[in-house]
Image (tube, helix red, strand yellow):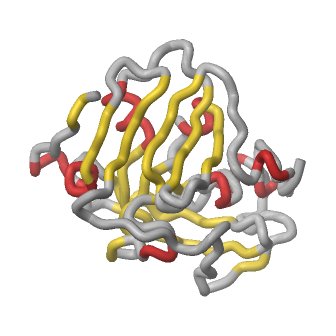
Amino acid sequence: MTEAGGADADTANSAAIEDLTDLYREYGADRLPPGQRETDRFPVLSKSGTPSWGPDTFEFEVWGAVEDPLAYSLSAFRDLPSVTQRQDFHCVTGWSKFDCAFTGVEFGEIVERAGVRDDAEHVLFHALDGYTTNLSLAECAREGVLFAYGFDGDDLPADHGGPIRVVTPHKYAYKGAKWVSGVEFLTEKELGYWERRGYSDTANPWNEERYS
């Protein structure tokens, strides 16, 4: 497994904010998906509470159908080239929070560094609390899919998935694992925690794909 170090200082971070809040236009005329209500709050939801972790022992791993498995300490991960994006956030329980500024590493950055193989078609995200969630590799390659460690100019709070969470603005938020500890690239689909329990595998908010 390759030990992943930090990036050069001049490429490590980006100050510009990319606005992705018009993503909804791909799906229709309404920014707020059907069945959702807008809120200024950011409710905290998880399957089993916030797990404990330590900044000196935390590790983010990449494995599976890749040429170069990776392992990052938290500091090394945060040294990777990053972006800040303004996104909307849609929870399957019926609330949406607009204009969230997430800072993190784009999914494509990890794909490039790991050398994802041509036969990889699916992704399974793993979290510190045992949570998993799946997406196709094509869906993960869309703009806006981030391994986020910052929120609104500060570190991502632990109860919202810090130190690292996945954000997926084109999907319901259960597709974005909190406390993500790694990503596994697969040649065959494997369903995640909620998907095995009846939640939609596709999770498109504008089609109200909440349950299978």
Q: Is residue 30 left or right of residue 3?
A: right
| Residue 98 or residue 117, whichever sits in front | 117
**Residue occupying the far top of the picture:** 118
Q: Is residue 167 left or right of residue 9?
A: right
| Residue 194 or residue 94, whichever sits in front | 194
Q: Is residue 15 left or right of residue 193?
A: left
Position above or below: 201 against 35: above
**Residue occupying the far right of the picture:** 212
Q: Residue at x 42, y 67 (%)?
A: 162
Can I make out residue 175 in this image? yes
Q: Residue at x 37, y 22 (%)?
A: 115
Q: Position of residue 3 (x, y in %)?
A: 21, 35
**Residue occupying the far left of the picture:** 9
Can I make out residue 207 in this image? no
Position above or below: 91 against 198: below
Please tell me how many numbered marks the rendered image carries. 0
Q: Position of residue 165 (x, y in %)?
A: 47, 59
Position above or below: 57 against 63: below
Q: Position of residue 85 (x, y in %)?
A: 43, 60
Q: Residue at x 61, y 58 (%)?
A: 22
Q: Position of residue 145 (x, y in %)?
A: 51, 48
Quarter holding the N terminus is: top left
Q: Residue at x 51, y 34 (%)?
A: 184
Among the 4 quarters of the image, the one containing residue 61: top left
